[in-house]
Image (cartoon, rainbow, N blue to C red):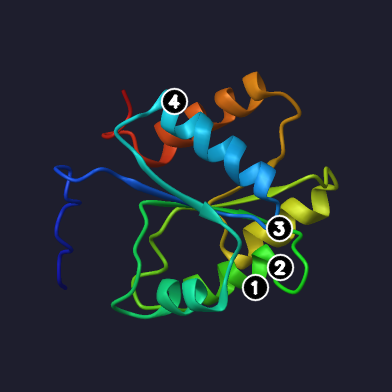
Amino acid sequence: MTLSSPPDITRSPLILVLDDDPHECTLLGTLIEDTWPHCAVRAGPPTAALLRDLTHPDGLRPDLLIVEQDMPGCMGLDILRAVRATPGGQTLPVVILSADEDPRGAAAAHHAGASTYRVKPTTPGEYRSMLADLLLTFLPNRAD
C-alpha cells in the first residue's frame, strides 16, 4: 500500500469552473476571488484541449472542479466520468451544478461519481453561500 503525499498547502488551491455561459464563469470566478483571494480560479468553457489536459495522467490537477451539467456538445456527467477514469481522478472533488431541481439529476450525478450535486443559486448571495460551503467541505485546510 502506498501512501499519497499530503497536498501542497504552500501553493494556492486551484478551483476550475467549467461552464459554457461566460456570465456564469465571470460570476463564479469573481465571487471565488473576492471571497477567497488566496485561491486561483480558472473559469471557462470545456475546450477539447482543456479536457485532454484534465484527463491526462500528468495533466491539470485542480483542487476542486465545478462543472455545469447541461452544456451544448459536452455534458457535465461526461466530463465527470472522464475525470473519474483518469489515474488520480477518483479523489478530485467534483461538483455538478445544474438548473434542474429534479432529484433524478442528482441521483445520476452521484451514481457517476460526483462529490456533490447542487442546483444553481439565483442570487449572488446564494452563490456566495454555496461556494463557502463547497470550500469548507472540500478544501477545509485552505478556507479562511
> What amino acid is at disc 2?
Met
94 or 34: nearer the viewer: 34
43 or 143: nearer the viewer: 43
**Residue at point 56%, 63% (across, down):** 113
Marks 1 and 2: CB-CB under 8 Å? yes
Q: Quadrant of residue 122?
A: top right
Residue behind mark 3: 69
Q: CA distance from mark 4 to mark 1?
A: 30 Å
Element class at badge 2: loop
Q: Which mark is residue 142?
A: none
Q: Earlier in the sequence, mark 4 or mark 1?
A: 4
Question: On the picture, is 96 further left or further right than 90?
Answer: right
**Residue at point 82%, 47% (across, down):** 100
- Across and down, in percent, residue 76 comes to 66, 63
Q: CA distance from mark 1 to mark 3?
A: 9 Å
Which circle, 2 or 4, is nearer the viewer? 4
Q: CA distance from mark 2 to mark 4?
A: 28 Å
